[in-house]
Amino acid sequence: MQENIECLRCLICGKEYAPDDVQYICPDHNLDGTLDVNYNYDNIKKIFDLHTLKKNLDFSMWRYKSLMPITENISPPPLRVGWTPLYHSNHFVNKFNLKNVWIKDEGQQPTGSLKDRASALAIVKAQEAKATIIATASTGNAGAALSGLSASANQKNIIFLPESAPRAKIAQLQVYGSTIILVNGSYDDAFNLCRSACELYGWYNRNTGYNPYMSEGKKTVAYEICEQLIWNAPDLIIVSVGDGCIIGAVHKGLKDLLALGWINKMPRLVGVQAAGSNYLTQAWENDEYLQIKPAIKANTIADSISAGLPRDRFKAMNAVTQSDGVFVTVTDDEILAAIPELASNTGVFAEPAGAASLAGLKKCLEKNLIKSDENVVLINTGNGLKDIKSSQQAIDKFKSTAHLVNPDIQALKSIEKFFPI
Ligand SMILES: *Cc1c(COP(=O)(O)O)cnc(C)c1O
Ligand SMILES: [Zn+2]
């Protein structure tokens, strides 16, 4: 057993398991029995401290491997995952009258989304489990992440996608050479088929909200934010929510840092959901019991946060309630408008689910949920180049700045009034 892990604990019944005794979920609670990995911080403190970290020149997510569910002699996939930039935005400080606003740009990950953090860890765990094939269901980005990282590590993999996944995202998997199964059905159907196939063929299952270790990869984004802010935790972290794995992981990372004494407060976590896919906002607002609330019909332009039954809903709900945070809902139009607003003010080009964090910030300001002396971090979860169609739609709708001229200087002069001054 690994020295740094204490147990895996079921979020429903609290039953504790040794990592070797259970692979994915609590056997007593089936799909609801998401497991949380619990660490022995005393053991970790013996080998890992801020001084050790500061000397570490590995600027990737693996700089925190002592806080991850892996043995020390791991060989992670070659692609560099993590240590994405945290940009300060003076524009947004002035525009929104806040103390500080930063954008954590996960669009800079090797396959263009935060999912790389989870898939990189999944490949290590699959190797530990001696599985020859690793599989996942995905709406696009989780698959791309597994696909690209697998390509770099020479790992055989199979991706299950709903047939409706954006063509560009499917193309990304195809160039990486994955085996792709397009499921004639929803993401939920793809998820269930993938799970049955993993059981039948003995493949390693990376599915979000099912494999307990995915949160443990994604939580490194919270470590980085805090390290980049020299361990001054922000007041708020705003992130979009589909399955809820990311927000749960951000919470987990912050809890680790609090337990180690590296930060001294828990930031309020803001979960941003699309109006057409707001299961968790509904449950949070109406105090609904997650074990019985049925799936909703999800429909939003932000395909990465379209989830009728959020797979990691228990961790996501804990993240918001335990951090004194909120869930907010934004419309597809607000999400679309946020794409050019984020890009033109900060240079960060986000896909709809990434820009949703900015739409969420504006919603919080509207509702007076943030004070002007507070520090805010927005997470851009995915690169805008993944979904050009949506940004074209946003431009058509909110901002058209292309001017057609004949190729001569007089013609150009005739549109001088459009030049920036
Ligand atoms: C997966 C994803 C999300 C949402 O993460 P969940 O864990 O499903 O809540 C948000 N944005 C992007 C770009 C994603 O790929
Ligand atoms: Zn249980």
Image: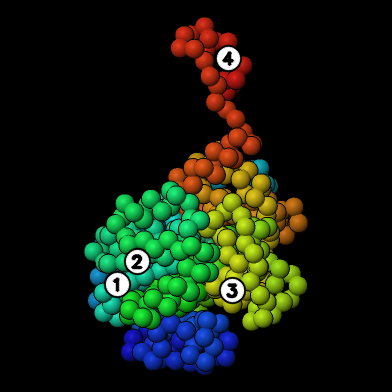
- Few, some or many residues within 10 Å of mark 3 (<14, 14–19, 20+): many
Q: Is mark 1 within 8 Å of ligand 1?
A: no
Residue 365 makes an appearance in the image: yes
Q: Earlier in the sequence, mark 1 or mark 2?
A: 1
CA gap between label 3 and label 2 equals: 25 Å
Would you say 73 lies left or right of 330 here? left
Query: Which quarter of the figure is the N terminus placed in?
Result: bottom left
**Which residue type carries mark 2?**
Ile
> Which residue type carries mark 1?
Ile
User: Closer to the camera, 277 or 125?
Assistant: 277
Q: How far apart in space, not on screen, are marks 3 and 4 (Cα)?
A: 53 Å
Sequence-first tag of 1 and 4? 1
Chain-order first, disc 3 or disc 2 = 2
**Label 1 element class:** strand
Residue drawn at x 41%, y 53% is 170
Near mark 4 (Cα within 10 A), the count class, few <14, some 14-19 or many ≥20, is few
Disc 3 marks a residue whose amino acid type is Arg
Q: Tell me which corner region of the image, top left, top right, bottom left or bottom right, holds residue 23.
A: bottom left
Does mark 4 have its CB less than 8 Å from ligand 1? no
Label ID, residue 133: 1
Q: What secondary structure is marked by label 2?
A: strand
